[in-house]
Amino acid sequence: MSNNFHQQLGIALENATRVNILSPYLTMPAVNFLFEHLPLGVDTKIIVRARPADIISGAVDINALSILHQSGVKCFLHRTLHGKFYQINESEGFIGSANFTSNGLCLTGYGNLELTVKVSLSSNDRLLIASVFQDAIPITSSMIKKIIEFSSKQEKNLECCPAWWENILPIMDYIPSNDGLYVGDLPWCNLFSDNKDADIEHDEDIFLYGKSLEEMKFEFLQSKIYLFIVDAISHRGNKQMYFGELSECIHGCLKDDLLPYRKEVKGYIINLLSYLEKLVPEQFSIDRPNYSQRITLIY
């Protein structure tokens, strides 16, 4: 682990021929740090989360994102990005809690207390990183312009802020539903029981767990796992799938390098069924005709 991550990252950038950065948050000091250490012409890609609330709160500086884009850095948005990862060249990487921000890198003042580990990347690791970029949405100049227009008209009222960009950027309507899943796309909480703090934190971030049912439903209807299960069941003639079949289907589509055991996947499926039953009972019927639960797509 490292408590001088920005120093190690700076040295790595100075010797880089290729850089991939995954960071939900992004601020201008980190962009200046990148330009200070990265040689000209290095192939660089960055994914940020950049939800409307992230822009309004300043967690993602749209002007910094614009400067990166104008400088030739390939920038992407990923709605559910939570991990922080820095890939340098083919086989070197840093993974931990540090966002690509001034506080995350401790560029000024004390910064945040972050834990970061340097790792060697396997071929599977590189494929996983590539698949995250495939799931992300490329940023264009017109998108940046619309986001800047949106942010200039908004007060810092996060309660009234839209959850995503559907009505602001029509291009965002497409969320890949057939490109595989990650464990992070699945519900970690059960809506009918108590849950661990770490699971609650995950579902707060992905599904607005703890908000009103209306807010949770709106977020869930736009999630990858919801689109995935609708697509999977709708292709069946009887529009039905049993618990074991759904568990097998989801396990087979997970892209995570270290796949969970099937018994762990069953836990996620139980959580998913609680979401379907609680949030969209008009769209899914869940019963138990024999020993196994049956999920039926009503329409």
Image (cartoon, helix red, strand yellow):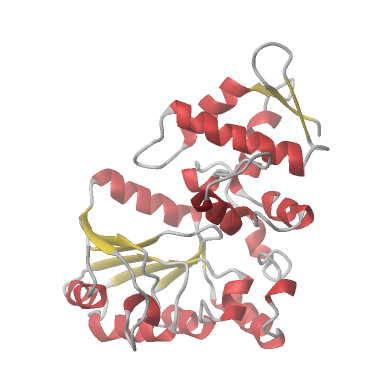
Tell me the residue at 67%/56% (across/down). 210
Q: Which one is in front, 92 or 53?
A: 53
Vertical position of residue 236 compared to residue 163: above or below: above
Asked if residue 72 can be seen in this view, the reply is: no
Q: Judge from the rendering whether residue 80 lies leftward or rightward of residue 131; answer left or right.
A: right
Q: Which one is in front, 247 or 212?
A: 212
Vertical position of residue 153 compared to residue 114: above or below: below
Which x, y percent locates residue 125?
30, 48
Q: Quadrant of residue 236?
A: top right
Q: Which one is in front, 62 or 2?
A: 2
Tell me the residue at 63%/50% (across/down). 223
Which x, y percent locates residue 263?
46, 26
Q: Residue furthest top?
A: 290
Vertical position of residue 204 compared to residue 286: above or below: below
Q: Judge from the rendering whether residue 142 lies leftward or rightward of residue 161; answer left or right.
A: left
Which x, y percent locates residue 250?
53, 32
Asked if residue 254 can be seen in this view, the reply is: yes
